[in-house]
Amino acid sequence: MKKSRISKRDFHYQAPLAFVGLFYAALVGWTVLCVWLIGSKTLSVGWPLGQLLMIGFVLAYTWYFSLGISYKSASKPAVALK
């Protein structure tokens, strides 16, 4: 009988806390910098509301997907189908 190539072990991965913290610190820094630069330009020049809403939408979606990034992963062994 052939030996199965399917793993029988569970696999677990968790990103190091330093990498997760660095990622979110960079994201916070990027957001603060963007809001500061766009805010200063808006106050001095005056941008249309539509453009500001689009930029706000992009920032919100950036945060939405960044918070959805998984830093923990686990997999169960696969089950062979007959």
Image (cartoon, grey):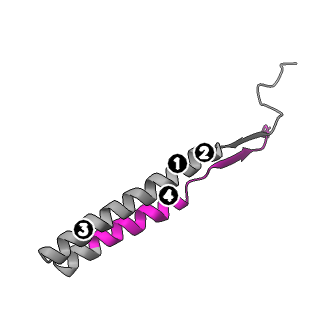
Magenta segment includes 81: yes
Q: Which residue is mark 3?
A: 38
Kindly check if marks 2 and 1 are in contact, taking CB atoms under 8 A apart as contact. yes
Q: Nearer the viewer, mark 3 or mark 4?
A: 3
- Residue type highlighted by circle 3: Ile
Q: Which mark is residue 66?
A: 4
- For mark 3, give the secondary structure: helix
Magenta range is 54-82
Label 3: few (<14), some (14–19) or many (≥20) C-alpha neighbours in 10 Å: some
* 49 relative to 16 in the view: left or right: left
Q: Nearer the viewer, residue 21 or 54?
A: 21
Task: Give the CA distance from mark 1 to mark 4.
Answer: 13 Å
Label 4: few (<14), some (14–19) or many (≥20) C-alpha neighbours in 10 Å: few
- For mark 1, give the secondary structure: helix
Q: Position of residue 75 (x, y in %)?
A: 73, 44
* 30 relative to 68 in the view: left or right: left
Q: Nearer the viewer, residue 55 or 82?
A: 55
Task: Give the CA distance from mark 3 to mark 4.
Answer: 21 Å
* 56 relative to 41 in the view: left or right: right
> Which of the 4 quarters of the picture holds residue 55?
bottom left
Above or below residue 49? Residue 3 is above
Q: Which residue is mark 1?
A: 22
